[in-house]
Amino acid sequence: MTQAKNSHDNHDQHAENPKTHPTSNAVKDPHDWTTGEEPMTGAQASYLKTLSEEAHEEFDPNLNKAEASLKIDELQEETGRGK
């Protein structure tokens, strides 16, 4: 009986934890990110460089995480790689 209760408690914890919902962070506006002012990640830089080349635009290595995310969205739309 204790095991069933623990299993139920874990389920309740997951239901309240936004990190367990894969889309919860995906829909958050980059302007609202607490880490948005940090330098873009290596993965962002790599993908953004590829998209920039495909769109014949200059790659800006000085974008922060939030700016890079917005630019990636823009260039995905422009290059047809959109979601």
Image: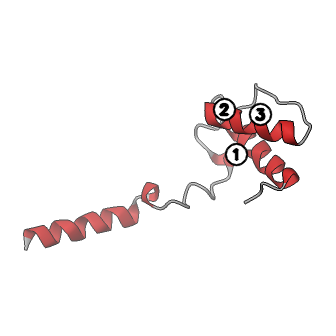
- Residue 41 visible in the shown view: no
SS class, disc 3: helix
Residue 7, x across and y down, in percent: 21, 68
Of discs 1 and 3, which sits in the foreground?
3
Locate residue 22 relative to residue 41 in the image: left or right.
Answer: left
Q: Three-letter amino acid code at disc 2?
A: Met
Task: Please name the residue that numbered disc 1 is placed on.
Answer: 31
- Marks 1 and 3, how far apart in space? 21 Å
Q: How many marks?
A: 3
**Sooner in the amino-acid sequence: mark 1 or mark 2:** 1
Q: Position of residue 12 (x, y in %)?
A: 31, 68
**Whole-percent x, y for residue 33 in the image:** 61, 44
Q: Secondary structure at mark 1?
A: helix
Residue behind mark 3: 49
Residue 34 location, quadrant: top right
Does 1 sit above or below residue 59? below
Structural crowding at the residue carrying mark 2, measured as other residues with C-alpha within 10 Å and reported as few (<14), some (14–19) or many (≥20): many
